[in-house]
Image (spheres, helix red, strand yellow):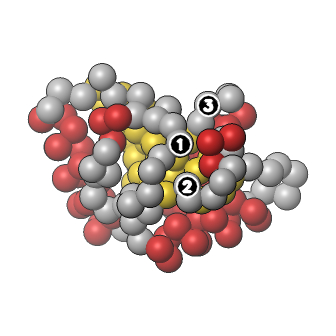
């Protein structure tokens, strides 16, 4: 069954998501970053190039020819996914295909709207019996 990890109190949600993406890639795992909002996905893509000056996170879009060989794949949800290892959700709602992944990462920001969306996802996952881990990341 899919394991769900919530990371909450992220001052900068996308920057923290970049840190998670880098950590997953460093551990030789494969990550799909899901964001149905094109602006969020583009902002995350740009940030992966610049969030750390000494580290590069190899990434591409799910529609790219090299997606199957790339550790971090960015997806909006309509495209076929090259793997189902770890999913990082940057959307407001739960990804419709989340259960096909071994692990799901949910980053929750500090604003009330984001917290409310995260509570809804948490309740959904818990009501269906998924293993949930909650990690506070204050100061991150």
Using a 10 Å C-alpha cutoff, classify the residue at mark 1 as few (fewer than 14 neighbours), some (14 to 19) or many (20 or more).
some
Q: Which mark is residue 62?
A: 2
- Residue 66 in the image: x percent, y percent? 69, 50
Give the percent coordinates (x, y) of residue 68: 62, 42
Kindly identify which residue carries mark 1.
82
Q: Separation of disc 1 and disc 2 at Cα?
A: 7 Å
Lower position in the chain sequence, tag 1 or tag 2: 2
Whole-percent x, y for residue 84 in the image? 46, 35
Dots 1, 2 in contact, CB < 8 A:
yes
Badge 2 element: loop
Separation (CA) of disc 3 from disc 2? 16 Å
Q: Which residue is drawn at 46% across and 42% down?
A: 87
Does 59 sit left or right of 41 as displayed? right
Of callouts 3 and 2, the N-terminal one: 3
Q: Is residue 61 among the parts visible in the rendering?
A: yes
Q: Earlier along the polypeptide chain: callout 1 or callout 3? A: 3
């Amino acid at each position: 069954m899919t394991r769900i990890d919530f990371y909450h109190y992220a001052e900068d949600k996308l920057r923290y998501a970049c840190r998670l993406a880098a950590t997953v890639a460093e551990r030789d795992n494969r990550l799909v970053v899901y964001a149905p909002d094109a602006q969020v996905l583009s902002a995350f893509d740009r940030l992966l190039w610049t969030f750390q000056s000494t580290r590069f996170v190899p990434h591409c879009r799910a529609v790219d020819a090299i997606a199957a060989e790339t550790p971090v794949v960015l997806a909006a949800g309509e495209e076929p996914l090259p793997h189902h290892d770890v999913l990082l959700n940057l959307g407001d709602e739960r990804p419709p295909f989340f259960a096909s992944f071994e692990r799901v990462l949910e980053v929750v920001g500090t604003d009330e709207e984001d917290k409310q969306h995260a509570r809804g996802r948490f309740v959904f996952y818990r009501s269906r019996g998924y293993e949930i881990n909650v990690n506070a990341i204050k100061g991150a």
